[in-house]
Image: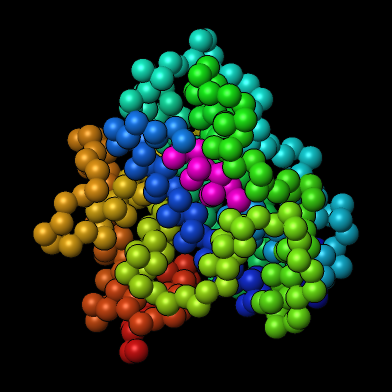
Amino acid sequence: MPRHTFGNAMPPHLQLAAVRCTLEVVDQLQDILKYSVLGHHDWVRMCMYRTGDAMDTIGYLAGVIAAHLEREGVSPRGIRNLLRADAERLRTIGWRFPGSGFAKCDLERMPDSVRDQVRTSLAYVVVRLPVMLRCAVRSGSVRWPSRCLGLMADAMDGLAGLANLLAAVRAVELSDELLMRYQQLYQQRPRSGMPYEADRDYLKGLLGLPEESDDATWSFVGRAAVGRMREPLRADPYEAMVMAMLAVLDDEFDGRRWEDRSRKPWPLVRNAAVGCLNGLELALLGDDEDPFYWLADHDGVYAEHAAWAMAARLASIFPDGSNGGGVDILDLLHATFGRTLVRSER
């Protein structure tokens, strides 16, 4: 990609969307993890909902970046290559669980084999988010489009595989029509069609240009998600802690391989990523509050260590104890991923 076309970093008008997308996705991944340990009778449906939401949220950002590249003169073929559209995996109902699957009476809690894959899939996604955010806030990388879009395409494909697995778990006793509704196939946007008119309009909104189209295929859910991505960002305790969590993962895995030859995350990577998602739940608790869900001893140790690491990271960035309160989220991003200590004076 020519240096004069893309500059050295993600342009400011895309940074806000990248940060909001990341916050949304972490929240959705947390919900999937919660339902994997809660004894909720409808965990399959709820996990499918959140899996589809996370995949679509990443897809909205990928589409907006595609619209930016199109505006900068990249060809449709070049955009499809960056999005890895030829290898795209969709959350369709294309296969069944090995063997006879599970009957409804067997599914009061998530089976261990399914939970193992859920955690693997979540780790596969979450370790890619810090790298995407580095592309948003660090200068010096003219390859930010290919790096960013490649990681997002990987994450979307990983979530599509998880959605397929969850659908297969219930395929024995649910109709295809109902599974399609749970997978939210009506709002899925294939990468091969990006950018869509909605992506171009969103980019115009970021640039302060008038929007011209009203894409009828852009669902209400899609509009709501993109609407949130436009909201001003202030570093409230949750947002600050998410950034601290991702910075901890960034520090932990900097320069390391994430996965083996089969593209499955190494156990250390999986444990750290899932531990951080669980640790986020613990880190946000007040002194007299109990966790929303209880963890096994092994998971609890990882979660506690992750919570301590997040708190220490925030304390090093904000030594006055503000924990990001009243600080612009992009300032917090620069502090966490730029590894530059700052002190809040606002």
Tell me what residue is drawn at x 54 percent, y 28 percent.
167
Quarter of the image where the C terminus is located: bottom left
Seen at 80% across and 55% down, the residue is: 79
Q: Is residue 7 left or right of residue 314?
A: right
- Which picture quadrant has residue 145? bottom right
Residue at the image position 50 percent from the left and 78 percent from the top: 232
Position above or below: 190 against 216: above
Please provide percent x and percent y for residue 58.
60, 54
**Residue 244 figure quarter:** bottom left
Residue 114 to residue 336: above or below: above
The answer to whether residue 156 of the structure is visible from this angle is yes
Residue 171, image x and y in percent? 55, 21
- Give the extent of the magenta segment: 46-56
Dominant SS in magenta: helix
Which quadrant is home to the N terminus? bottom right
Q: Say whether residue 53 is magenta.
A: yes
Residue 240: image x %, image y %? 37, 68
Please identify the residue farthest to the bottom as the structure is shown. 345
Q: Left or right? Give the position of 288 relative to 148.
A: left
